[in-house]
């Protein structure tokens, strides 16, 4: 990047930060993209004249709403819900819904911004969006989660639809939560339509949906290795996470001959130097999908190392599969 490009980048970022004060995660995401895009458009004045970069960093629409629900003790609770509809230039908005206590508008704007690019790379006519709430599902009963999902959809339903915006799951939102939200949408709209992805097979879900993201991460790595004349077979892989994506990434890596040596959650990571097996993976699936337990229980069950409050990147390996890390701020 030459001096002119750096000056253009600084000028652009100053304007973005002024329009979006305090949104550090969003600033960082845009900065990383802009450092690549600005040199590319430098000799394309038509892009500057059309304000392409400025338009790409301004969401089409942001919906913010209160989610009122009742806990098991009869207390009325209130959370904040969001939907950032970032760009629908090539098709309906598409992106996950995240339930996590760290959800903020800045985080969702950064995710929706990046989702727009990710979706465009599929070659499918879908735009980018992201949504969620600062609701923490951990420690909540099944009934509380159901009531929250229904209350969330009661506010969101008027802003989504099969030709408008098609949400999916994300952190804290799996098949159970999608089912509760879809049931509420169907009840309100009196329509059975494809407005949410990640539904159960018995009511319109896809047979490969559960495995898709984890398998896709491995297929991408496989193609990258093929490009340099290598393969996954025989390599050691460190995976961050132990939920749906991590589980199926581990399954596919094992099927292709790799040794998976780590998994993690918010409490820390396990290091299994002998590698996961089908039985060990079944234990993880039951632990995380049914009992909602901690990954430290894997260490206790199989007598392996557990490292508290750390990610597994200090473990030597050939391949690394990270979940999105907490963003480094500029």
Image: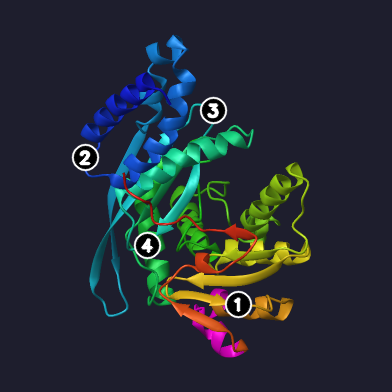
Front position among marks 2 and 4: 2
Whether residue 293 is in magenta: the answer is: yes
Front position among marks 3 and 1: 1
Q: Earlier in the sequence, mark 2 or mark 4?
A: 2
Q: Position of residue 78 (x, y in %)?
A: 24, 62
Q: Is residue 158 visible?
A: no
Q: Nearer the viewer, residue 95 or 68?
A: 95
Q: Residue at x 70, y 56 (%)?
A: 208
Q: Earlier in the sequence, mark 2 or mark 3?
A: 2
Q: Earlier in the sequence, mark 1 or mark 2?
A: 2
* Residue placed under numbered mark 3 in the picture: 90
* Residue placed under numbered mark 1 in the picture: 284
Q: Position of residue 241 (x, y in %)?
A: 53, 66
Q: Earlier in the sequence, mark 1 or mark 4?
A: 4
Circles 2 and 3: CB atoms closer than 8 Å:
no
* Residue placed under numbered mark 4 in the picture: 100
Measure the C-alpha gap from mark 1 to mark 2.
41 Å
Circles 4 and 3: CB atoms closer than 8 Å:
no
Q: Residue at x 35, y 26 (%)?
A: 6
Q: Which residues are magenta?
A: 288-301
* Residue placed under numbered mark 2 in the picture: 21
Q: Position of residue 309 (x, y in %)?
A: 40, 74
Determine which quarter of the picture holds residue 11: top left
Q: Nearer the viewer, residue 272 or 185?
A: 272
Q: Earlier in the sequence, mark 3 or mark 1?
A: 3
Measure the C-alpha gap from mark 3 to mark 1.
39 Å
Measure the C-alpha gap from mark 2 to mark 4.
22 Å
Q: Is residue 60 shown left or right of residue 212?
A: left
Report the label total: 4
**Helix, strand or loop for disc 1:** helix
């Amino acid at each position: 990047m030459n001096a002119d490009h750096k000056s253009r980048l600084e000028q652009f970022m100053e304007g973005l930060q002024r329009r979006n004060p305090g949104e550090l995660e969003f600033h960082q995401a845009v900065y990383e993209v802009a450092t690549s895009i600005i040199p590319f458009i430098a000799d394309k004045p038509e892009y500057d004249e059309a304000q392409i970069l400025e338009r790409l960093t301004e969401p089409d629409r942001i919906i913010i709403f209160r989610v009122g629900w009742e806990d098991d003790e009869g207390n009325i609770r209130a959370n904040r819900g969001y939907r950032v509809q970032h760009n629908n230039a090539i098709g309906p908005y598409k992106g996950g819904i995240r339930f996590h206590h760290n959800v903020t508008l800045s985080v969702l704007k950064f995710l929706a911004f990046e989702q727009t690019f990710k979706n465009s790379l599929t070659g499918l006519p879908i735009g980018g969006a992201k949504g969620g709430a600062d609701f923490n599902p951990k420690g909540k009963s099944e009934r509380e989660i159901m009531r929250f999902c229904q209350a969330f959809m009661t506010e969101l339903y008027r802003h989504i639809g099969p030709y408008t915006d098609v949400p999916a799951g994300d952190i804290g939102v799996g098949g159970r939560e999608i089912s509760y939200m879809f049931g509420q949408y169907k009840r309100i709209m009196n329509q059975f339509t494809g407005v949410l992805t990640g539904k159960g097979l018995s009511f319109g879900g896809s047979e490969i949906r559960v495995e898709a993201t984890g398998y896709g991460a491995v297929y991408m790595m496989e193609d990258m290795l093929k490009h340099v004349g290598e393969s996954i077979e025989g390599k050691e892989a460190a995976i961050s996470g132990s939920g749906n994506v991590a589980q199926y990434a581990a399954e596919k890596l094992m099927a292709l001959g790799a040794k998976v040596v780590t998994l993690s959650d918010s409490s820390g990571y396990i290091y299994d130097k002998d590698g996961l097996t089908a039985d060990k993976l079944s234990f993880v699936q039951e632990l995380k999908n049914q009992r909602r337990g901690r990954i430290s229980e894997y260490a206790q069950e199989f007598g392996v190392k557990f490292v508290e409050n750390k990610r597994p990147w200090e473990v030597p390996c050939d391949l690394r599969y990270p979940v999105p890390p907490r963003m480094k701020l500029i």
